Amino acid sequence: MGVGVKRAYKYRFYPSPEQAELLARTFGCARKVYNLALEARTRAWVVDRRRTTYAQSSAWLTEWKRAEELAFLNEVSSVPLQQTLRHLQAGFAAFWDKRTGYPRFKSKRKSRASAEFTRSAFRWRDGQLTLAKMNTPLDIVWSRPLPKGAAPSTVTVSRDAAGRWFVSLLVEDPTVKPLALVAAEVAVDAGITSLLTLSTGKKITNPCFERAERRKLAKAQRNLSRKERDSANRAKARLRVARIHARIADRRRDHLHKLTTRLVRENQTVVIEDLSVCNMLRNHRLARVISDAAWSDLRRMLKYKADWYGRKVIPVDRWLPSSKTCSVCGRINTTLTLGVRTWTCPGCGAEHDRDVNAARNILAAGLAER
């Protein structure tokens, strides 16, 4: 385990005008093919009660390319178009397994602008990457080196709302290996004031990146709302708003990566609550701060890093009364309300910090399940 782990390395790059135009056209064609295939597969099910496969949608793509009104599909590489059909197939497979909802159509304004290229659609030579239909390599900023001797198997090009271009290279990373065994085990209680409270008693402060930029963001959004629709000034104002959002997201992601890496390196077992963040976001009073805390991203990072480094992440039942249960005697304090941060157990008289007590109960439940 650990040898030959597939890992994505993401870099910024600066395309030439010709490259930017070709990539933008590729994004549009991939989105168009995805929507056409989704519409055709939905019609086949509604009308004929017939499930279709990737092979059938691939045959449809060949027919669409021959149609005069869709001739522009031939102007871009066929590989990203085939890949978007594979992504749609994966979406249907997840829907049939009841792991997610029905696939939705992609919007030009809201969906992620990206295209995926496999080995037949790019050339990797002497550390330079050239995509299909291009004559010159991409101008990539190599902010960190790839593993020695690594060659990408898949390349994903994307553009975010702030107008930044990124390329993600999927490579075999032999440097990812299981860490030495340690005796430490920890549980984390996710919160708002404290991002995490550890069963050791340590609290990790929530940086609240969105709150720190809230005034600047509100000013930029007010400025955007005053601009005339479809004007050049509105496009500039929209870009300013997108750049603030991108700064918030980048800082949050960087903080979570550092935090989860430290937790995984220092502990053999990490116990977490199996929270339903989607349902918690329905509480409109807390939705903003819960989104800023990014609990789902935290759990996802913990999970894949634990798999990489030979650690274990144990989720416990979300209905566990961890805050109300005394971690000393096990008595449940049914009168405890959300606003009470410290309390005394009526059974044994133990003094509890609400979050630390919850983390200790989560650890006990996780170790019992293991």
Image (spheres, rainbow, N blue to C red):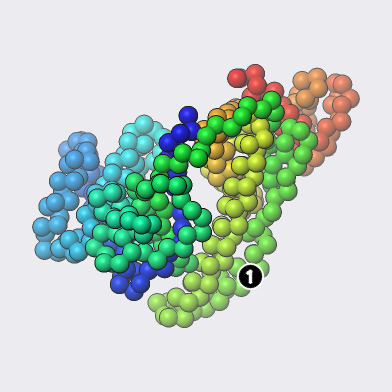
Left or right of 210 on screen, residue 119: left
Q: Position of residue 113 (x, y in %)?
A: 37, 59
Q: Residue at x 70, y 50 (%)?
A: 206
Q: Quadrant of the C terminus?
A: top right
Q: Position of residue 333 (x, y in %)?
A: 78, 27
Mark 1: few, some, or many residues within 10 Å (few <14, many ≥20)?
A: few
Number of callouts: 1
- Determine the residue located farthest toward the right in the rendered image: 349
Left or right of 341 on screen, residue 39: left
Q: Does the rendering let one see residue 34? A: no
Q: Residue at x 46, y 54 (%)?
A: 10
Q: Nearer the viewer, residue 132 or 233?
A: 132
Q: Is residue 131 above or below residue 361?
A: below
Q: Is residue 71 above or below residue 36?
A: below
Residue 360, by quadrant, is top right
Q: Nearer the viewer, residue 20 or 52?
A: 20
Q: What residue sits right under mark 1 in the picture? A: 216
Residue 163, by quadrant, is bottom left
Q: Residue at x 81, y 22 (%)?
A: 328
Q: Position of residue 54 (x, y in %)?
A: 22, 41
Q: Does the rendering let one see residue 251? A: yes
Give the residue type that dot 1 points to. Answer: Lys
Q: Residue at x 29, y 41 (%)?
A: 89
